[in-house]
Image: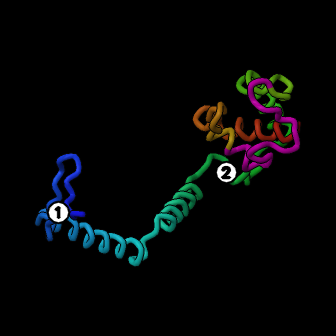
């Protein structure tokens, strides 16, 4: 039996070396891969670490950002009845379309519940009213005065 590989007219041609271009590309790719792996795996770079650093920087930046009334009304100018009256008026004008005239909720959530999605504290309500929330709650920071904002918060807390 002969060792000739002549199937379908294809003749076997034995070559000892691949073309020079392929060898250059092959060894260049190996060198690049070792360098790339060494830089990213052994160099201390981590996308998780970078993400954590960016997240920390953003949270620090947001913590420094001043929210109108973010100190949860440290000074109490006027009495509670006055703020409740102002808050009830502002609520009727601006909030009742979404939260209902009795604050039981229409488009917006029921504000008479004990717990709200973002909290039912003075600070949480001030942030929600002034900055707004994704999903439909508009921001009122530029539209309400400090007294109006405090009045609305006091009114919601009284519900």
Q: Nearer the viewer, residue 120 or 83?
A: 120
Residue at left offset 51%, top offset 65%: 48
The crowd level at tag 1 (other Cα within 10 Å; few <14, some 14-19, many 20+) is: few
Place of residue 103 in the rendered image (x, y in percent of width and height, measured from the top left): 83, 29
Q: Residue at x 41, y 74 (%)?
A: 41
Vertical arrangement, residue 73 with respect to residue 88, above or below: below
Residue receiving disc 2: 70
* 158 drawn magenta: no
For residue 104, which quarter of the picture?
top right
Q: Residues within 10 Å of mark 2 (few under 14, many from 20)?
A: some
Q: Is residue 31 left or right of residue 72?
A: left
Residue sitting at x 65%, y 36%: 145
> Is residue 62 rendered to the left or right of residue 26?
right
Residue 25: x %, y % from top left: 19, 64
Q: Which quadrant is the C terminus positioned in?
A: top right
Residue extent of the magenta highlight: 106-127
Type of secondary structure dominating the magenta stretch: loop
Nearer the camera: disc 1 or disc 2: 1
Q: Position of residue 40 (x, y in %)?
A: 38, 71
Tally of numbered tags: 2
Q: Which mark is residue 22?
A: 1
Q: Residue furthest toward the bottom? A: 42
């Amino acid at each position: 039996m002969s060792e000739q590989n002549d199937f379908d007219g294809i003749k076997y041609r034995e070559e000892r070396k691949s073309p020079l271009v392929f060898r250059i590309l092959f060894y260049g790719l190996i060198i690049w891969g070792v360098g790339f792996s060494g830089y990213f795996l052994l160099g201390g770079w981590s996308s998780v670490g970078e993400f954590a650093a960016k997240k920390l920087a953003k949270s620090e930046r947001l913590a420094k950002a001043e929210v109108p009334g973010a100190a949860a009304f440290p000074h109490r100018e006027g009495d509670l009845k006055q703020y409740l009256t102002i808050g009830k008026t502002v609520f009727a004008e601006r909030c009742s379309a979404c939260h209902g005239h009795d604050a039981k909720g229409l488009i917006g959530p029921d504000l008479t519940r004990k717990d709200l999605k973002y909290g039912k504290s003075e600070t949480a309500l001030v942030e929600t009213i002034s900055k707004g929330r994704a999903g439909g709650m508009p921001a009122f920071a530029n539209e309400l005065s400090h007294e109006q904002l405090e009045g609305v918060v006091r009114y919601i807390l009284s519900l």
